[in-house]
Amino acid sequence: MKKILLVIISCIAILAIAYYSFIYFIPYSEGNRAGELIKFSHKGAVIKTWEGQISQGISGAHMFNFSVLDKDKNVIEKLKELQGEYVELTYIERFGTFVFWGDSHYFVTDVKKSRSPHFKK
């Protein structure tokens, strides 16, 4: 009986490690998005995560929600400074997420100020 229990627990542990490794090491897609940075906040009741939102378009019809990992301190500081500005985000999309990472499957790795295509001079 103990041998069967040990095998079951080992299989569960191996599956958990494989799932975590898949989510952490294998990105689904990578890309860039641009828009006006509408919201960036540190939210959560027990586990705080950095969450943001950009508006892509004049009417705000398309919103892009994203998360930033705590280890990306430089990105967090830039996003705080660029609140309300037009920005270009570089992101990695993951198959899944964990509670301690954030709400979104999109994780921003870089941000830079950009010029809005709607107001060209």
Image: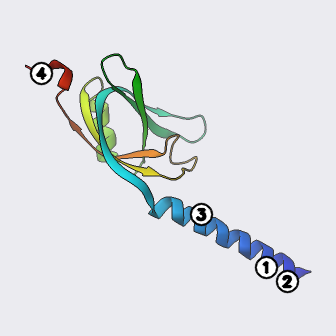
Q: Residue at x 80, y 78 (%)?
A: 6
Mark 3 or mark 4: name the one nearer the start of the chain: 3
The answer to whether residue 110 is left or right of residue 100 is left
Q: 95 above or below 3?
A: above
Residue drawn at the location 25% of the way across and 25% of the way down: 85
- Quadrant of the image containing the C terminus: top left
Seen at 66% across and 73% down, the residue is 14
Task: Say which residue label 2 marks.
Answer: 3
Say which element carries label 3. helix
The amino acid type found where label 1 is placed reads: Val
Check residue 7 in the rendering and tell me which mark sits there, or answer none.
1
Residue tagged 3: 19
* Figure quadrant of residue 59: top left
Tell me the amino acid under the disc marked 2: Lys
Of all residues shown, which one is farthest toward the top? Answer: 59
The reply to whether the C-beta atoms of the residues labelled 1 and 3 are less than 8 Å apart is no
Position of the N terminus, as image quadrant, is bottom right
Q: Position of residue 65 (x, y in %)?
A: 44, 34
Rounded to the nearest angstrom, the CA distance separating label 3 from label 2 is 24 Å
For the residues marked 1 and 4, what is the alpha-carbon distance in whole angstroms?
Answer: 65 Å
What percent of the width, then of the height, locates residue 96?
54, 51
Query: Disc 1 to disc 3, how far (Cα)?
Result: 18 Å
Q: In the orientation shown, which residue stands out farthest toward the right?
A: 1
Q: Are marks 1 and 4 in contact (CB under 8 Å)?
A: no
Q: Earlier in the sequence, mark 1 or mark 4?
A: 1
Mark 4 — residue? 120
* SS under mark 2: helix
Position of residue 46 relative to residue 5, above or below, is above
Of badges 3 and 4, nearer the viewer stands 4
Disc 1 vs disc 2: Cβ atoms closer than 8 Å?
yes
Q: Is residue 100 left or right of residue 108?
A: right
Earlier-in-chain disc, 3 versus 2: 2
